[in-house]
Image (cartoon, helix red, strand yellow):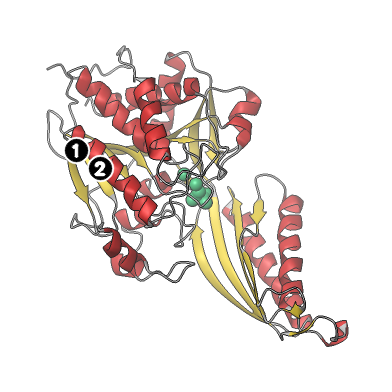
Amino acid sequence: MTSFPSAPESDLRIDIRRLLDRLAALAEIGAIEGTDGSSRLALTDEDKAGRDLVVGWMRDLDLDISIDGLGNVVGVMPGETTGPAVMCGSHIDTVHTGGRYDGNLGVLAGLEVIETLRTAGVTPHRPIAVGFFTDEEGARFQPDMLGSLVYVGGMALEQAHSITGIDGATVGDELERIGYIGAAPLPATAPVAFVELHIEQGPVLEAEGFDVGALTGVQGISWTEFTLTGQSNHAGTTPMSLRHDPGLVAFRAAAFVGDLAVELGHPQVGTVGRIELEPNLVNVVAASATFTVDLRNTDNGVLFDAERRVVDFIETTAADAGVIVSARELARFDPVEFDPDVVDRIERVAEAMGLSVKRMPSGAGHDAQMLSRICPTGMIFVPSQGGVSHNPAEHTNPTDLESGANVLLQVLTELAAK
Ligand code: HGY
Ligand code: MN
Ligand code: MN
């Protein structure tokens, strides 16, 4: 059995056909007809089926598998030594209109790295682990990155279990129902390091012609749910001056969020992604409007300012309309900087492979931003075609998938070699 060279001159490379086949097999679960995408909202039957498939692949690779109380699953390839592992991974839950690469790539490339090592008959000095975290998307149960947040001790397990989703189910009940409440200790033991391979989900790498991104960090995220309560009334008989219309306030707020993001300029973004009127009928002035505001920025100060301005606008507009406002924080994560040594290593390994590399922050949230609380962490990006993601049309070409997975292979073997 050979152990690893400490430099990245190892000529080991992943098997892209095997990786593409696993991505396709996983995408079949919750497949969205006529597209390459899937719908596997966290803790649904589709998520369970995806979990079972990946756990089966972990078993096929003889990994030591552990499941914790929030359903986070980790498979470990033993090393020459025992103790904390060098870890990779991501998520396999999707948004309702998900693509086949978001999250899945980081998990399946981790399996591919381990299978490549196994096939080459080598044993890393340190164990190498691959994991998938529960409910990274936060589309059904907020906040996002819930599993990795609990994994690193950022939220108590009981609190996470009590979270009620947009469909009224709780995290704990759904974990119980799909049989993914495990006994592995929480918070988890800190890995030696954590590296996540992910698609960029944005336009930068493709537009600027880079092969790979070496992530410097993740921007701050703010999710708030606003509920506006007014007076339901007849759309035909009620003069505008007598209305208390929460729908009108909600749509004004959505326009304000978009205009504010444009005013503050890049990288500020603002989105009203979910809005529900009650009773939602053509001839009825709404009784209530519930909507979410997603604000993000790499600069926490600007993000706080944007949050305050949105709340001020909604409160003022609602008061003028005689509408009552209530707000609920769904997620608030500060911007995160990744470990400079890990970022340097990703950049050096990619360049040594002849790849062009761009240092950049992530616009999307990722499990890595939680793991960075407990260990040296970095991320590898590969380009998204047209910058499209959270859309079944999401695509990354096989050459880029292969490059990203080979960078992951080399970085993990280096980190596990000492
Ligand atoms: O919302 C996000 O950035 C991630 O997809 N959870
Ligand atoms: Mn993701
Ligand atoms: Mn996502």
Tell me the kind of residue under disc 2.
Val
Check disc 2 and report the residue beneath it. Answer: 55
Label at residue 359: none
Q: Residues within 10 Å of mark 2 (few under 14, many from 20)?
A: many
User: x and y percent of residue 89 in the render?
Assistant: 34, 39
The residue nearer to you, when weighing 301 against 109, is: 109
Q: Is residue 99 left or right of residue 124?
A: right
Image quadrant holding the C terminus, namely top left
The residue nearer to you, when weighing 408 against 361, is: 408
Q: What kind of element bears circle 2?
A: helix
Check disc 1 and report the residue beneath it. Answer: 59
**Residue furthest to the front:** 33
User: x and y percent of residue 20 in the render?
Assistant: 40, 27
The residue nearer to you, when weighing 333 against 103, is: 103
Going 18% across and 58% down the picture, which residue do you hit?
183
Q: Is residue 261 left or right of residue 90?
A: right
Going 24% across and 52% down the picture, which residue do you hit?
188
Tell me the kind of residue under disc 1.
Arg
| Residues at marks 1 and 2, CA–CA distance in whole angstroms | 6 Å
Residue 308: quarter of image: bottom right
Q: Is residue 239 left or right of residue 183?
A: right
Q: What kind of element bears circle 1?
A: helix
Q: Is residue 156 something one can see in this rendering?
A: no
Q: Residues within 10 Å of mark 1 (few under 14, many from 20)?
A: few
Going 19% across and 54% down the picture, which residue do you hit?
184
- State whether residue 393 is above or below residue 112: below
- State whether residue 279 is above or below residue 101: below
User: x and y percent of residue 62 in the render?
Assistant: 16, 34
Image quadrant holding the N terminus, namely top left
> Mark 1 near mark 2, Cβ–Cβ under 8 Å?
yes
User: x and y percent of residue 277 in the render?
Assistant: 66, 73
